[in-house]
């Protein structure tokens, strides 16, 4: 009986070692929660303060050239702040999680994860710049959601399986947002805010609590 128990323990140890060598498991669920809260705050600032509660083509077409330029710069600054805050918080919390488990953040697996994410993110970033230069503002948010979702789908091969499904949901929300572009800011809040919070809580309760 003791030999069987020891065998099971050895198998669990081997399985854990193999899992740690092929998947990046230092992602913090709390990082997802904070990223979602930051996105919701950014969406609220964009909608209620920068856009005055309006995200339609009529709103942008009714602005003067100077006003439109100011709104665009404010929206870019808002999105940039959300991105930097989410990345910074995510990095700090994930690093703390890795340190608490005696793991390293930068491993061959984490590098492959980043490379797999960079291809769709860079492609999406280039498309968003093109859309911005051609004044197709309402397609920017759907593009963000879709390409971010594709990046997460790729990343799901190297980390928790939940990341893959989060990516699928982001893509679906992005496609719906493309059909209903005037509600883009709400889909932004849903995709980058609510979904991140739900994903982060799920990850935290399942793997960290």
Image (cartoon, helix red, strand yellow):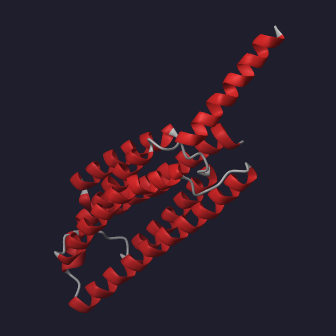
Residue at image point 24% right, 70% down: 137
Query: Outermost residue toward the top?
Result: 1
Q: Is residue 95 left or right of residue 174?
A: right
Return the x and y of residue 161 as percentages of the image width and height.
Answer: 49, 38
- Tell me if residue 11 comes above or below residue 158 in the rendering: above
Residue at image point 45% right, 43% down: 156
Return the x and y of residue 73 as percentages of the image width and height.
Answer: 35, 83
Return the x and y of residue 160 as percentages of the image width and height.
Answer: 53, 41
Query: Outermost residue toward the left?
Result: 134
As rendered, which of 62 and 173 lies closer to the eye?
173
Q: Is residue 190 left or right of residue 16?
A: left
As rendered, which of 23 and 176 lies closer to the eye?
23
Q: Is residue 2 visible?
A: yes
Return the x and y of residue 126 as percentages of the image width and height.
Answer: 26, 68
Q: Where's the N terminus, which quadrant?
A: top right
Q: Where's the C terminus, which quadrant?
A: top right
- Tell me if residue 51 comes above or below residue 176 in the rendering: below
Q: Is residue 183 visible?
A: no
As rendered, which of 96 and 21 lies closer to the eye?
21
- Tell me if residue 142 comes above or below residue 12 in the rendering: below
Q: What is the quadrant of residue 186 in the picture?
A: bottom left
Residue at image point 58% right, 36% down: 19
- Tell me if residue 22 comes above or below residue 89 in the rendering: above
């Amino acid at each position: 009986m003791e030999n069987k128990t020891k065998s099971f323990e050895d198998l669990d140890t081997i399985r854990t070692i193999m899992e740690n060598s092929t998947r990046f498991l230092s992602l913090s669920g709390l990082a997802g929660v904070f990223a979602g809260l930051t996105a919701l705050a950014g969406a609220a600032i964009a909608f209620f303060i920068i856009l005055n509660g309006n995200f339609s083509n009529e709103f942008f077409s009714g602005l003067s050239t100077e006003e439109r330029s100011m709104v665009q710069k404010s929206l870019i600054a808002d999105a940039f702040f959300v991105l930097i805050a989410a990345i910074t918080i995510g990095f700090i919390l994930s690093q703390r999680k890795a340190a608490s488990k005696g793991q390293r953040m930068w491993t061959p697996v984490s590098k492959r994860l980043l490379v797999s994410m960079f291809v769709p993110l860079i492609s999406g970033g280039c498309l968003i710049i093109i859309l911005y230069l051609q004044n197709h503002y309402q397609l920017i948010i759907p593009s963000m959601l879709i390409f971010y979702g594709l990046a997460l789908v790729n990343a799901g091969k190297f980390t928790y399986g939940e990341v893959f499904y989060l990516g699928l949901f982001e893509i679906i929300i992005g496609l719906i947002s493309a059909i209903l572009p005037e509600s883009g800011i709400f889909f932004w809040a849903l995709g980058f805010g609510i979904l991140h919070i739900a994903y982060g809580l799920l990850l935290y309760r399942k793997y960290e609590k």
